[in-house]
Amino acid sequence: MTLQKQVLFWLGALVAVILLVWLLRGMLLPFVAGMALAYFLDPVADRLERVGLGRLLSTLLIVGVFLLTFVLVVILVGPLLTSQLTAFIERLPALMMSLQQLFTDQNREWLAPILGDRLPDIQKSLSELATQGALWLVASLRGLWSGGAALVSVVSLVVVTPIVAFYLLYDWGRMIRAIDSWLPVKYRDTIRELANEMDQAIAGFVRGQAGVCLSLALYYAVALIAVGLNFGLLIGSMAGVLSFIPYVGSLTGLLTATGVAIVQFWPDWHLILVVVAVFAVGQILEGYILAPKLVGRSVGLHPVWLMFALFAFGYLFGFVGLLLAVPLAAAIGVLTRFALRRYLASPFYTGLSRTVDASDGTDA
């Protein structure tokens, strides 16, 4: 097969896979989640096998412990988060209006010299904007929370995902060996090297970032509850989970918590500054302790590229796209670096008749 035919074949296969994922995106969530769960729990199963447990027993033990932990978290934390989310949705318009009034009240002497006669018009515009924005956000959250499709997705996720994860985790080694045996013999070493680099990037980032998110969610929730902030558990958990996207979690949590703190604690600036300090300390913990220790700096995922991948794949494929975004971004990054190395070593770049090793500049 010529190079041109190979390129056309793999491009056609890629287009077919993308089209298939797009068509089936509504029912793929539990299967993709189960595959992701099996992938990240496979090292634990391998360690248990080395200890002496069989693969079946190791798989049953891992899935059982995971389900037990998940059920306990849902029972202990779920009702609190649900009640706070419901209350937050109901009180959001009032919070927005209170916040708007604090900054545009005509009695605020510090605004009058700056805005002058324009203050009433600005107040009216901000009031309308805050009202419309709050109503839109409340309607969106209610639709997401009570939608029938969302409920079906959650049920299928809870029921189907553990089953898929169990079977994939049990057969993981055999699947990898089978796929490895299908690789073209001529390019087998190169493909294995690329696959290993992708595995290190995906596992290093996602496992490490998951630890960072859990640590930050626990810290923010406990700290905000200790301060006495309304909806502290909800805001702290949200900030921790959204920290998976660089800078988005901390910024979202900071803005939300500061707005709630201003409405709740005004005019006591001390408690408002304490809330801001909670997120400043969280950023220090994330940037200088958690991220270097748990994630490291060699995963090859730039924050801007990661954010673009999450938004792009989420827009195209919904929640399934969010699950696929990180591994696909890591894979694309690895393939791009590989292609760049080949280009730098090619005669097209060097202008030489012989290829040059891109790492040290010597003749290959």
Image (tube, rainbow, N blue to C red):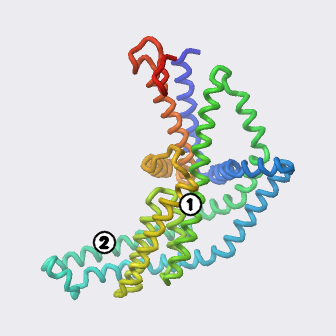
Instruction: Check disc 1 and give the amino acid type.
Output: Val
Please report the residue visible at 67 percent of the width from the left and 50 percent of the height from the top.
40
Q: Amino acid at mark 2?
A: Leu
Foreground: 133 or 326?
Answer: 326
Percent coordinates x, y for residue 120 in the rendering: 19, 80
Can you tell which mark lies on residue 129?
A: 2
Q: Which of pointers 1 and 2 lies earlier in the amino acid sequence?
A: 2
- The residue positioned 54% from the left and 50% from the top of the image is 296
As helix, strand or loop, the secondary structure at mark 2 comes to: helix
Q: Residues within 10 Å of mark 1 (few under 14, many from 20)?
A: many
Say whether residue 174 is left or right of residue 213: right
Tell me residue 169's x, y (percent): 75, 48
Q: Nearer the viewer, residue 104 or 262?
A: 262
Give the CA separation, mark 1 to mark 2. 36 Å
Quadrant housing residue 104: bottom left
- The image position of residue 125, as x and y in percent, is 25, 74
Q: Nearer the viewer, residue 290 or 318?
A: 290
Q: Is residue 32 above or below residue 193?
A: below
Question: Which residue is labeled 1 in the image?
Answer: 212
